[in-house]
Image: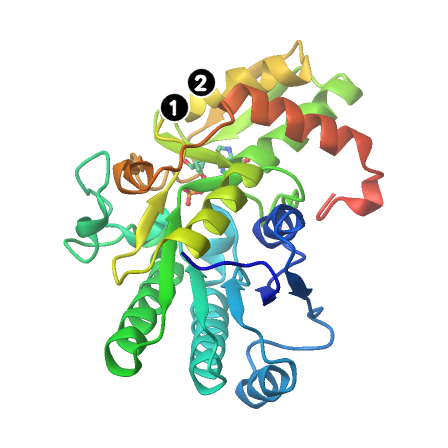
Amino acid sequence: MFELAGKKVWVAGHSGMVGSAVVRRLESESCKLLLVPHSELDLRRQDKVEQWMQEHRPDAVFVAAATVGGIHANSTRPAEFIYDNLSIELNIIHAAHVCGVKKLLFLGSSCIYPKFAPQPITEDALLSGTLEPTNEFYAIAKIAGIKLCAAYRWQYGCDFISAMPSNVYGINDNFNQQMSHVIPGLLRRIHEAKLQGVPSVAVWGSGAVRREFIFSEDLADGLVYLMKCYSGEQHVNIGSGEDITIRQLADMLVDVVGYKGEITFDTSKPDGTPRKLLDISAIKAMGWHPETPLRKGLEEMYRWFTNQSAGAIRGA
Ligand code: GDP
């Protein structure tokens, strides 16, 4: 058991969707939060990261900082996805070792698994097959992060762990159409079509592929749980345990938004991997369960989206 009360906890990437949810969740842990904006610390600069960590000496670190994006961003900006993510994790993990950080949690992604991994995907499917090409560069960086944590554990005895979430959605998501994942992308398009009386909205791809989604607040709760209760080399899957087709998701979003138009499918856009459902039995056996059904999470996200002024929404 790693107690957070009284500890200095750095959430790297605190302005992103996952990082900000972790910050909200940590408010009930009586720890001292360390947060540094991107404008003050570029995590891709090794010397700056080491200097900042030497100065602030966190006891625990959540590595939620990353260059992330949906299928379009991943396919068109591979150099940024591999360079940014490799340097962020390399710099933070090494500096954490140098500065004697007691516990570190590295956040990966379900895209680390092979494109045709047996479903639901167990943790040991890692490196058992070829990756999905649309997010290969991001996945390679995230696999390196898992292996960094494992290597520093073996060689130096660092208590560094890794968590692999399924597709995350929720509060503070990125709604920019060029960057976003499917939920914020479609939610915004359907919402705007409703307001402007547009008769149809195009969903990218065939709509037949399946995805699992976890609500930002559930993920943050699971990450804090792992930080407190898990110590081991094996990375741990974290998801909702259920998947749906993109067509079913689009229908649900139409319902949540209250849009009366039609959904069409633009098959000139890529589908990506056919299915990505995580096996979450390991984290469930530790005593953690996801709480928010997809429909409820989408309603909460839509409420949040419509309550923000346009300027406060990333990408809108
Ligand atoms: P992925 O899990 O890495 O493929 O991430 P995405 O969330 O970007 O895409 C999931 C699936 O939703 C893919 O099959 C996309 O083609 C499909 N999709 C449908 N409409 C959209 C959209 O508006 N934005 C994004 N990003 N994906 C969409």
Pick the front one: 42 or 206: 42
Question: How many C-alpha atoms fall within 10 Å of the one at disc 2: few (<14), some, or many (≥20)?
Answer: some
The kind of residue tagged 1 is: Thr
Q: CA distance from mark 2 to mark 1?
A: 5 Å
Q: Residues within 10 Å of mark 1 (few under 14, many from 20)?
A: some
In the foreground, 206 or 223: 223
Residue 70 placement (x, y as % from top left) = 50, 47
Looking at the rendered image, the quarter that the N terminus falls into is bottom left
Residue for point 57% across, 27% down: 297
Three-letter amino acid code at the position of disc 2: Gln
- Residue of label 2: 248
Label 2 secondary element: helix
Tell me which residue sits at (64%, 22%) in the image.
299
Q: Position of residue 124 (x, y in %)?
A: 18, 51
**Looking at the image, residue 240 lies above or below residue 53:** above
Work out which quarter of the rendered image holds the C terminus and state it: top right
Task: Name which residue lies at 73% across and 32% down.
Answer: 304
The residue labelled by disc 1 is: 245
Residue 310 falls in image quadrant: top right
Residue at 36%, 37% (x, y): give it: 287
